[in-house]
């Protein structure tokens, strides 16, 4: 693309002239769609990313600085970052849905655990204290992950990580993990 056309597009963007978006789409739309598709690997999602990218480009048009990057590089970064953000938001949404589905599994009270599985508590002493505390709060004190986060003053993401790692460590202790299955299911 000629630098004259690029300068014209940048000027139009700075003026918030709608013709800038038309020119950008005409000259860069297919390439930017390819960038989005390469990241999200879904045609419909790539179209959404492209649309969101053009909205961001429109809003940030006056912030483009030709001394820092070429126009295409700037457009590329916005599109790629928008695609990555889209994947992250979908991932977070999926994790939240999974969290809601399994929240009852982690919300077990000590009174619900059968005596034959109480040796799990004894094995907690074999793992690092930071995992012990989280597993104890979730399984034996009957807290939800959010309650444990608030009570222990630990970020929710850290609670989830420590839960996952703590369970992995317990599985190593128990071997095949069959003893842990009842702990992970709402026990009678």
Image: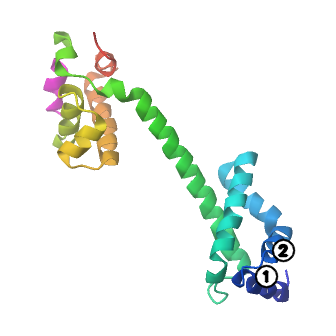
Q: Is residue 82 left or right of residue 54?
A: left
The quadrant in which the N terminus is found is bottom right
Instruction: Label the magenta part by its dominant secondary structure.
Output: helix
Image coordinates of residue 87 in percent, x first then y, are 58, 50
Q: Which mark is residue 23?
A: 2
Q: Is residue 131 left or right of residue 68?
A: left
Local packing at callout 2 (Cα closer than 10 Å; few below 14, some 14-19, many 20+) is some
Nearer-N-terminus badge (1/2)? 1
The quadrant in which the C terminus is found is top left
Magenta run includes residue 58: no
Q: Secondary structure at mark 2?
A: helix
Q: Is residue 22 above or below residue 122?
A: below
User: Which residue occupies 66% across, 54% down?
Assistant: 39
Q: Secondary structure at mark 1?
A: helix
User: Which residue occupies 67% across, 78% down?
Assistant: 61
Image coordinates of residue 167 in percent, x first then y, are 30, 31
Does the CB distance between marks 1 and 2 fall below 8 Å?
Answer: yes
User: Which residue occupies 41% across, 34% down?
Assistant: 99
Magenta run includes residue 122: yes
Q: Which mark is residue 9?
A: 1
Range drawn in magenta:
118-126
Q: Is residue 150 above or below residue 25?
A: above
Q: Is residue 182 above or below residue 69?
A: above
Image coordinates of residue 172 in percent, x first then y, are 29, 29
Query: Which of these two is toward me, 77 or 99?
Result: 99
Q: Is residue 59 left or right of residue 123?
A: right
């Amino acid at each position: 693309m000629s630098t004259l056309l690029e300068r014209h597009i940048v000027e139009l963007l700075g003026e918030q002239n709608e013709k800038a978006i038309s020119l950008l789409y005409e000259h860069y739309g297919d390439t930017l769609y390819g960038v989005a598709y390469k990241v999200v690997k879904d045609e419909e999602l790539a179209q959404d990313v492209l649309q969101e990218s053009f909205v961001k480009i429109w809003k940030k048009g006056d912030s483009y600085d030709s001394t820092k990057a070429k126009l295409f590089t700037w457009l590329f970064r916005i599109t790629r970052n928008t695609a990555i953000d889209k994947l992250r938001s979908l991932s977070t949404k999926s994790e939240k849905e999974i969290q809601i589905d399994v929240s009852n599994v982690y919300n077990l009270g000590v009174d619900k655990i059968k005596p034959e599985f109480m040796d799990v508590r004894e094995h907690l002493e074999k793992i690092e204290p930071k995992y012990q505390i989280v597993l104890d709060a979730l399984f034996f004190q009957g807290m939800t992950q959010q309650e444990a986060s608030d009570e222990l003053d630990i970020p929710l993401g850290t609670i989830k990580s420590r839960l996952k790692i703590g369970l992995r460590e317990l599985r190593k202790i128990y071997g095949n993990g069959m003893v842990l299955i009842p702990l992970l299911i709402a026990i009678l």
